[in-house]
Image (cartoon, rainbow, N blue to C red):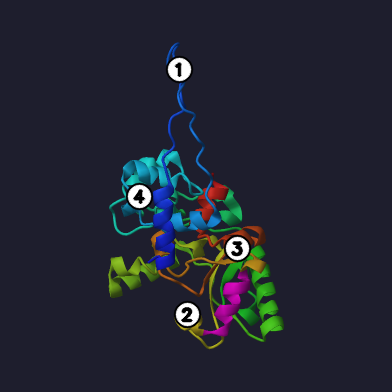
Amino acid sequence: MPSEPLIALALSLLISLVPFLPAAEKSAPGEEPAPAVEEQPSLSEEQLAALAQTPASWFDEPALLDALSKLPHYDETRAQRYLAYRTNGTWTLEQVLRIVNTDNDLPRFTAAVDADLNDGDLILVNKYSRLASDYVPEDLVTVEPAYSNGGMLKSEVNDAFCDLVEAMWAEAGLHLVNASPYRSYSLQSSLYARYTARDGAAAADRYSARPGYSEHQTGLALDVIAPGGTLNGFKNTQQFVWMRDNAHRFGFILRYGDGMEYITGYKFEPWHYRYVGVEAATFIYENGLTFEEYYAYYVKK
């Protein structure tokens, strides 16, 4: 919920916003010349931030599209899809853009396409992008035993993870353990079947990937814990604080952030990290993006 000062700023901004007028046509002979149309001033960063947090329900349809068009990443080809969220819940303008631009307004799984293997370390695997049952990544190596409970990662990812663990120890005196790296399609199928039998499909889909839809099958993702700890307890550790603030330096991102389930499709997982390379990870971290947004805006745009 936006704060009261932010709401006040948004209200004053809405009052001041006037939709763009069509360009004046040339006057016919004997007619008064049409008045010049003044250009609308650009919005300040503070005004844009307030506008982004304004509920979509405050606008009628033309005003909603006009307001959205002032924000970054507005896509006029998706205008009708944005409008569906004007009265659908309490979404802010920023959330409407995030949802539609990452295709989260489409039905999950049934609208899924094959993941693009040419994307390399930036491959997108989620509830809209799947891997084949026979897909196995190249260059899998056994994770350094001193830092792992077993399993494999892509060679590049294993090297980056080892560098990360060594830096954590050197900088903070903390150890970290790789608890779950690469998983085959068949292993993910067994895990998902177990969770659905226990909790039902709807609940399991919030924390477990269906087979073919798991990032672990790429060899680019891993779950981490503190020594002797658990996944659920990881968020309460100093290791998590360090990872949250430093993982990007080694090419990793916190994949399923707190409050981002409406974009990522999964509940907050403080233990799940995904390798995307240092450049992408740093950009994602510094701009507060989900990987879905980065992929839509900077990989496939």
Amino acid on which disc 3 is placed: Glu
Q: Residues within 10 Å of mark 3 (few under 14, many from 20)?
A: few
Q: Which residue is mark 1?
A: 27
Does 81 lie within the magenta span?
no
Dot placed on the residue nearer the N-terminal end, 2 or 1: 1
Dot placed on the residue nearer the N-terminal end, 3 or 4: 4
In magenta, the rendered stretch is 237-247
Give the main secondary structure, helix, strand or loop, of the magenta stretch: helix
Amino acid on which disc 1 is placed: Ser
Q: Which residue is mark 2?
A: 231
Dot placed on the residue nearer the N-terminal end, 1 or 3: 1
Tell me residue 253's x, y (percent): 57, 66
Pair 4/2: label in front:
4
Pair 1/4: label in front:
1
Can you tell which mark lies on residue 106?
A: 4
Dot placed on the residue nearer the N-terminal end, 2 or 3: 2
**Residue 160: quadrant of the picture:** bottom right
Tell me residue 277's x, y (percent): 64, 60
Tell me residue 227's x, y (percent): 56, 86
Amino acid on which disc 2 is placed: Leu
